[in-house]
Image (tube, rainbow, N blue to C red):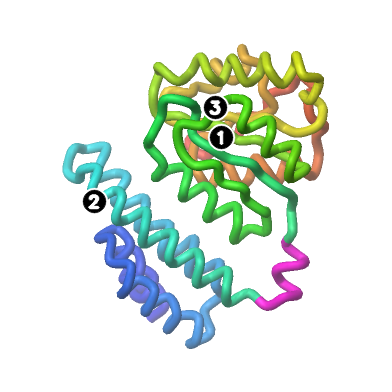
Amino acid sequence: MAEDLMKRIAQLVAEGDDEESVKLVKQAIADGHDPMEVLTEGAAKGMDIIGAAYDEGEAYLPELVLSGDAMTAVVDVIFDELDDDQKAASKQGTVVIGQAKGDVHDIGKNIVSALLAVNGFTVVDLGIDVEVKAFYEKAKEHDANIVAMSTLLTTSLPYMEDAKRYFKDTGVSENFFFIVGGGPVTPEFAQDLGVDGWARNAFDCVQLCKELMANKKPGSGETVIVDSEAK
């Protein structure tokens, strides 16, 4: 049964079993399941499971890391299964992404990067503890459409403010969209900062990037909010 297969994939990802996750994902695709269905109804549900357990204090950081690694491995497999026409048709733009200076947590960022890649974006991942100037330099080097900065630390929030100011002072605010996210980053903070967008989670971030590319102009002064959990 397809539903049982998706549940099993979800459980394997939640358990951080990358080898078995990849094996079952390959089997599901070989059996004719749509790769994106395997991602959204299988692997992504696994991240929901481990995320909820972490929030409830029933899982800890090492387990979250393992689950993130499994998710990344699954996304790599799914992207490899797309044919050239599918990949070409899905090209959305280039995103430069990284953790704000002072933040060495990268699980959420890695998931966002993986989901953006499988949804057709070219992703330039700068990693953790990234200087503001590095975002600017890489955006310029890769002719980026979007710069995404995230953090899980309140102490790194000022670097988002620094980035917004730096982009304005260097005259590049209208060259690319600047979006922010992460645990302590609220919609209100994003709006007050005047960035182009904010997303609640990794899947919302993909939707945000697609919406910006389709309908918006950088530096318009409007902050697009994408929040799948909003009532």
Three-letter code for the amino acid on which mark 3 is drawn: Glu
**Residue topped by disc 2:** 63
Residue at label 1? 199
Q: According to the image, label 3 marks what residue?
A: 131
Q: Earlier in the sequence, mark 3 or mark 2?
A: 2
* Residue at far left of view: 58
Q: Amino acid at mark 1?
A: Ala
Residue 164, percent from left and from top: 66, 18
Residue at 52% across, 79% down: 33
For label 3, the SS is loop
The residue at the point 72 percent across, 62 percent down is 90
Q: Is residue 37 above or below residue 153?
A: below
For the residues labelled 1 and 2, the Cα–Cα distance comes to 24 Å
Magenta extent: 83-90
Secondary structure at numbered mark 1? strand
Give the number of the mark in front: 1 or 2. 2
x%, y% of residue 28? 45, 80
Identify the residue at horizontal 33%, vertical 62% (top origin): 13
Q: Nearer the viewer, mark 3 or mark 2?
A: 3
Mark sitting earlier along the chain (1/2): 2
Neighbourhood count class around disc 3 (C-alpha, 10 Å): few under 14, some 14–19, many 20 upward: some
Observer-nearest residue: 128 or 25? Answer: 128
Q: Could you tell me which secondary element the residue under label 2 belongs to?
A: helix
Dominant SS type (magenta):
helix
Residue reaching furthest bottom? Answer: 31
Vertical comparison of 207 with 174: above or below:
below
